[in-house]
Amino acid sequence: MRTSLKLASAAIGAAALLPLGVTTAMAADGSGNANLAPVALNGVNGSGTAMVTVKGDVVSVTLAAKGLLADQPHAAHIHFGADARHECPAAADDTNKDGHLTTTEGGPAYGPVVVSLTKTGDTSPSSALAVDRFDTAPGGNLSYQRGDITVAPEVATAILAGQAVVVIHGVDYNGDGKYDGTAMSDLDPKLPAEATDPALCGVLKAAPVGAMATGGGGAAAQPEQGLLLAGGALLLAGLGTGAYVVRRARTQA
Amino acid sequence: MSSLPSLHGRRGTLAGVLTLVVGLRAHAGPPAPPLSRVAATSVPSPTDAPTDPPTELQVGQSPSATAAPAAEPDLGPILPASIPVTLDIPSIGVHTTNLVPLNVGADGVLPPPTDYATAGYYTGGPTPGQLGAAVIAAHVDGKSGPAVFYRLGELAPGALVHVTRQDGTVATFTIDTIARYPKAQFPTQLVYGSATSRAEIRLITCGGAYDRSTGHYVDNVIAFGHLDP
């Protein structure tokens, strides 16, 4: 009865596997994903994704976004502040009530710039407005990838802890296809507000851990082998042909 | 046991045994696509459009001699954010309304809908039609029989998935691949992180063997699709 032996050992194996739990998040390495959505009040009709992979204090960043003002530089940053709310700003953050959110007004939500997502050169906060080194969103589409960005340890930790926020800046309130307007930037009085106000925003979050428990078992396969063994034993007792039954069962299974 | 064969030679016994076998096979459980092996280096990447090489910038006064205008990255169609309300998958007879939000718990795990008859969507991801991977999950069965995603394993590449959203628009996705993964090797990155350059969908349920000792299926069945224009 090799079949019954197999079944027995399979059962023991399954029992031994039971304690296997879901793997917990890594301490130092990992990744965060952000779903970039239009910033409240700022009128961008687009969306984006950000993926940040952390290895120690080195991060690599992939960004994609649609619906941005085409062919204009879009400053993009990772924001984090220990005292920030670790979220994207809401309409209530419009403290001067002018109907738009500036980068400064978003500060309580996402904190200061900690990484400038430039295409080349420096990535520190001092490049936050290096407009000639940011992606220009050809056709309104932005696709960005850069690795080997060194960050402070607390920033790496914040990214994995769901506390860092990716913001892409640059809007077109008056819909004329360029950065202009009488309102000037809160960050650089030489730039129009349109060039620096936040467009898309998303909080970097670790993906959900592990698998999903999406079954109750009510329509699971019947434990046919066990029943067949019982049936086989019955036949064995009654007919003396148990071995044949089991052989049939194995070829059927 | 009325089907017990009488002793009329091997042929009669065989017929009886086959009857018994068939009779005991109430059903074979939910349909299951082949099991995928999730080796670190051989994870199939069925869903993500090739990531555009980062277009080297020639903004402003770039000294680069290649002065061609920056190519527009192809990110496919997208829709504005709007939460999903109804899910229709005609090829496997799915029509389910009142999708529920699924929030990651304190343990980091995404719980399934509490109601076996309801599908849910992952609130931490994009809504269906936004750039990135929107995740919808539902049970394969409940305690007493098939549930919303019982036939998910039957989905074939090319099948259409329609998600009606709160804003009234319908996001239609085409299935690219369907695969089954051991839960212990759940392809987290493939599900949640691989769609960085187009709008995609993931449909998740359970599959494989049902472990009666734990009360759980051992695998997850996952369908991957992308938004149609």
Image (tube, rainbow, N blue to C red):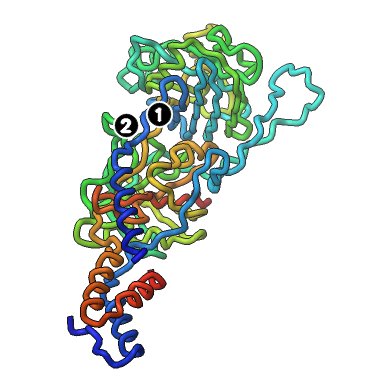
Q: Is residue A133 left or right of residue A227?
A: right
Query: What chain does mark 2 sit on?
Result: B
Q: Is residue A194 left or right of residue B55?
A: left
Query: In the image, what residue type sits under mark 1?
Result: Ala
The residue indicated by pointer 2 is B108
Residue A21 x/y as whole percent: 32, 37
Query: In the image, what residue type sits under mark 2?
Result: Gly
Instruction: Pick whichever, A173 or A225, lies toward us.
Output: A225
Check if mark 2's residue and mark 1's residue have beta carbons within 8 Å: yes
**Circle 1 residues within 10 Å: few <14, some 14–19, many ≥20:** many
Name the secondary structure under disc 2. Answer: loop
**Residue at image location 44% in from the left, 44% down from the top:** B129
- Disc 2/disc 1 C-alpha distance (Å): 9 Å
Using the image, tell me which numbered label, if any, was put on residue A206: 1
Q: Residue furthest bottom?
A: B8
Q: Is residue B121 left or right of residue B50?
A: left
Location of residue A128 with respect to A168 vertically, above or below: above
Query: What chain does mark 1 sit on?
Result: A
Residue A163 x/y as whole percent: 38, 19
Residue A173 x/y as whole percent: 48, 25
